[in-house]
Image (tube, grey):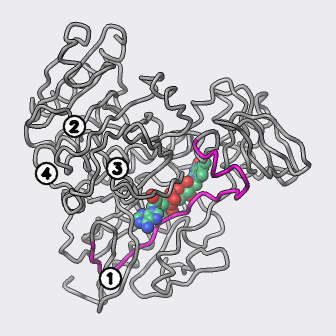
């Protein structure tokens, strides 16, 4: 078993909150075999805990390059949540364990119909929201990351395709952390342009995607 | 760790009690309120509070040793077992309307008959040149979060408190060398942590020194001491205490002391009827998770009494 019993139990408790079924696509790779195996094992725990409400399609990155290209997957392992148009809207380049468990389940819940706290605020401003890809660089030991994963994911789900969020564990993908010279988590990269370091709240993120100025803080 | 779970949340109803905060104080308070059969909602900006940023907690009775996040996970389990709703949001203002309170966030409005303010404190900044500029590029306020990025590097911790000592101890597991830079003559850590610092070969304490500037190019490269010396360093961890998050309370007339801490009595009451406060935001001289929890629990009991007394649909 690659994850601790504490997290296994957390998954079992959280996953029970899911009431509708959801399909996820998983890309694994032999170049990152350890994390790929861990991701599959963790997803098995989720699947069991939800009595099969979570369904997964598994693809090997190396042998499904066309599909990977279609979903813009350059690294694996990755989990994809795709919308009805088959566009990936939320991608986890991260094993959904530890601090990611609760936001992951919450995202699936909202994706399958549970109310979204930010729905009204996002819908109201939808025409002013710039289409954006948000890369959220996190680690498991970051105390603030769980909340920002939730905020980005729920914004994305309410955005009718205008937003896409990538949740990237930079301990699993250190090269991505190095690319953005990350020394503080969470770090948000919006449209490969703006880098926001530290703990950002929902209101500040909303301003950012509305292209207003943002107060950057820790 | 904690999220925007809409389940069990109803913006239309008037809660018996809304607890503001996501740290140990708020959770302790809400657990007791739920057991008093109060209709309680917790609203906190970030779940976990300050304690979740420390790598080890060894002074919470019943738990010999765990991480701050680990402790808060246990708190979360306890919350879940009582089905207490939690919402992750920041309350911007509180107004009194007749005999209840309306709490406003950017996204939502909530109503409550009583409010416990457990908003803790915000890390203090040094306010020196380079601090803002290099924030996230070598300047950090959380060793547990960012320490692992400094493997085999030289870092300094600014401050002389127990928290500063613990941050230095955590950092020493990974980095090449930690310098504690402290303006005083002796660090104020708990004796057990002071001894650990003294025994740790990777930690060196530089006494009677302030830093006046942080310098670098892309990332931090050095700090300037108040004796003019330039000191090469890769990371600066600032741990110089914190300021209470009491602005929200002050705006509705809650009294604070000269340190901006909310003045409470032994029942965790403030000067405003129906508003209680507890934990790091309040005026106790010694602030820890356990003391915050205790004040939070007392606040829950006082709020219970208060709501019973005003007897609005209760
Ligand atoms: C490095 C370090 C190590 C420590 N080690 C220990 C230890 O070993 N043992 C120990 O007992 N204590 C320790 N402490 C102290 C301990 O962390 C605090 O005493 C404790 O966290 C106080 O709890 P609190 O709930 O009152 O406040 P906090 O933990 O600060 O929580 C306040 C909460 O309120 C939220 N909030 C703020 N404003 C708003 C708003 N407007 N609306 C909604 N929510 C808001 C914040 O997001 C936060 O979640 C340590 C502190 C530090 C910094």
Q: Is the shortest distance between ligand 1 and the CB of mark 4 under 8 Å?
A: no
Image quadrant for the N terminus of chain B?
Answer: top left
Bounds of the magenta segment: B109-136
Q: Which residue is mark 4?
A: A114
For label 4, count other residues whose C-alpha is less than 10 Å away and answer few (under 14), some (14-19) or many (20+).
some
Q: Earlier in the sequence, mark 1 or mark 3?
A: 3
Q: Which mark is residue A89?
A: 2
Q: Chain of mark 2?
A: A
* Name of the residue lying farthest toward the bottom: B98
How far apart marks 4 and 1 lie (CA) works out to: 28 Å
Disc 3 and disc 2 on one polypeptide chain:
no
For label 1, count other residues whose C-alpha is less than 10 Å away and answer few (under 14), some (14-19) or many (20+).
many
Give the camera-side residue of A40 and B55: A40
Residue A185 x %, y %: 49, 40
Q: Which residue is mark 1?
A: B101
**Left or right of residue B66: residue A147:** left
The residue tagged with tag 4: helix, strand or loop?
loop
Which mark is nearer the camera, 2 or 4?
Answer: 2
The residue tagged with tag 2: helix, strand or loop?
strand
Residue A68 x %, y %: 22, 18
């Amino acid at each position: 078993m690659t994850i601790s019993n504490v997290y296994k139990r957390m998954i079992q408790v959280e996953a029970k909150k899911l009431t509708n079924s959801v399909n996820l696509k998983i890309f694994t790779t032999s170049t990152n075999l350890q994390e790929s195996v861990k991701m599959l094992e963790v997803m098995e725990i989720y699947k069991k805990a939800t009595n099969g409400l979570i369904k997964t399609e598994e693809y090997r990155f190396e042998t499904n390059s066309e599909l990977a290209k279609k979903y813009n997957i350059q690294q694996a392992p990755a989990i994809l949540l795709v919308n009805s148009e088959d566009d990936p809207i939320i991608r986890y380049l991260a094993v959904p364990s530890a601090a990611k468990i609760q936001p992951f389940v919450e995202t699936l819940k909202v994706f399958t119909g549970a109310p979204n706290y930010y729905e009204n605020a996002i819908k109201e401003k939808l025409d002013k929201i710039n289409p954006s890809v948000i890369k959220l660089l996190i680690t498991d030991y970051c105390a603030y990351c769980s909340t920002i994963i939730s905020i980005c994911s729920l914004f994305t789900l309410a955005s009718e395709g205008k937003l896409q969020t990538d949740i990237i564990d930079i301990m699993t993908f250190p090269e991505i952390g190095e690319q953005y010279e990350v020394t503080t988590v969470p770090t948000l990269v919006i449209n490969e342009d703006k880098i926001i370091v530290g703990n950002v709240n929902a209101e500040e993120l909303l301003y950012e995607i509305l292209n207003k100025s943002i107060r950057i803080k820790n | 760790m904690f999220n925007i779970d809409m389940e069990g949340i109803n913006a239309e109803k008037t809660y018996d009690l809304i607890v503001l905060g996501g740290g140990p104080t708020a959770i302790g308070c809400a657990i007791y309120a739920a057991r008093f059969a109060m209709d309680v909602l917790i609203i906190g900006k970030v779940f976990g509070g300050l304690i979740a940023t420390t790598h080890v907690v060894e002074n919470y009775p019943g738990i010999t040793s765990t991480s701050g996040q680990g402790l808060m996970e246990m708190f979360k389990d306890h919350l879940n077992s009582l089905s207490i709703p939690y919402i992750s949001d920041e309350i911007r203002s509180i107004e009194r309307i007749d005999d209840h309170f309306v709490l406003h966030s950017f996204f939502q409005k909530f109503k409550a008959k009583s409010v416990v303010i457990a908003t803790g404190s915000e890390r203090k900044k040094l306010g020196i040149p380079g601090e803002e500029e290099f924030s996230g590029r070598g300047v950090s306020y959380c060793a547990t979060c960012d320490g692992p990025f400094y493997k085999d590097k030289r870092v300094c911790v600014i401050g002389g408190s127990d928290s500063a000592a613990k941050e230095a101890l955590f950092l020493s597991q990974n980095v090449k060398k930690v310098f504690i830079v402290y303006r005083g003559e002796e660090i104020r850590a708990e004796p057990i942590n002071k001894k650990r610092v003294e025994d740790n070969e990777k930690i060196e304490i530089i006494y009677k020194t302030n830093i006046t500037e942080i310098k670098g190019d892309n990332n931090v490269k050095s700090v300037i001491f108040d004796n003019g010396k330039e000191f090469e360093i890769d990371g600066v961890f600032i741990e110089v205490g914190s300021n209470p998050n009491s602005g929200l309370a002050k705006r509705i007339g809650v009294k604070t002391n000269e340190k901006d801490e909310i003045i409470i009595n032994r029942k965790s009451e403030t000067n405003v009827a129906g508003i209680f406060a507890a934990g790091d935001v309040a005026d106790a001289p010694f602030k820890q998770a356990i003391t915050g929890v205790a004040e939070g629990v007392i606040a829950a009991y006082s709020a219970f009494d208060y709501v019973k007394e005003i007897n609005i649909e209760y």
